[in-house]
Amino acid sequence: MKKIETAIPGVYMIEPRLFKDTRGYFFESYNKNVYDREVAPISFVQDNESFSTRGVVRGLHFQRPPYSQAKLVRVIKGVVLDVAVDIRKGSPTYGKYVKAVLSEENKLQFFIPKGFAHGFAVLSDEALFQYKCDAFYEPSAEGGIRWNDPDLNIDWGIPADQIILSAKDELHPWLKDFDSPFTFEKEPE
């Protein structure tokens, strides 16, 4: 496994070590010992899977404390553009985002810590998306930021008139009107 730093500290791309031969391939998609040592000590408690078609944008979602979630996401089938937005008050990267293309071919994973809104857009005809969470889903803690916030100016890789959203995702607040429940905590030096 190779940990790849991104423009926002604490958000990582994970490149698994792939073993290929004439039969196909094998890789460890997750190993707690390696992950704790190389990325972050964390205990995932819930695995989720979603299936979507081209043009679907899911996000930008988060759960409020004390139910906030760190996530490890990957694509099993298809291609998505995955986005993590820093929504931690006082963070030097507040309102900034990191995005990455995750696909069945590249097998990359994206680690998104607590304090980030997360979303993805489906760029292929279909996508099967899986993610691990370190806290259980709690409906009363759901939150979100508008996917098309002009201050974020995220290029989702899909023409705006072809984007498919849930009714709920169309109603999230703009970043400028959002009172974040997350606070940036500087790591000890």
Image (cartoon, rainbow, N blue to C red):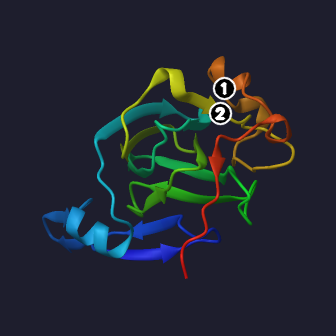
Instruction: Determine whether the residue tagged by mark 2 lies in a helix, strand or loop.
Output: strand
Q: Position of residue 162 (x, y in %)?
A: 71, 31
Quarter of the figure with residue 103:
bottom left
Q: Please give left or right for residue 71 compared with residue 160 in the image.
A: left
Q: Please give left or right for residue 74 compared with residue 141 in the image.
A: left
CB under 8 Å between callouts 1 and 2?
yes
Task: State the residue at coordinates (64%, 20%).
Answer: 168
Pointer 1: residues within 10 angstroms few (<14), some, or many (20+)? some
Which residue is more in the foreground, 77 or 137? 137
Would residue 61 be visible to someone looking at this image? Answer: yes
The numbered mark at residue 84 is none
Instruction: Determine whether the residue tagged by mark 1 lies in a helix, strand or loop.
Output: helix
Instruction: Count every numbered label the image shows and give the total.
Output: 2
Amino acid type at circle 2 is Gly
The numbered mark at residue 169 is 1
Amino acid type at circle 1 is Asp
The numbered mark at residue 144 is 2
The quarter of the image holding the N terminus is bottom left
Q: Position of residue 144 (x, y in %)?
A: 65, 33
The quarter of the image holding the C terminus is bottom right
Q: Is residue 17 above or below residue 116?
A: below
Q: Which one is earlier in the sequence, the residue at label 1 or at label 2?
A: 2
Q: Position of residue 135 (x, y in %)?
A: 37, 40
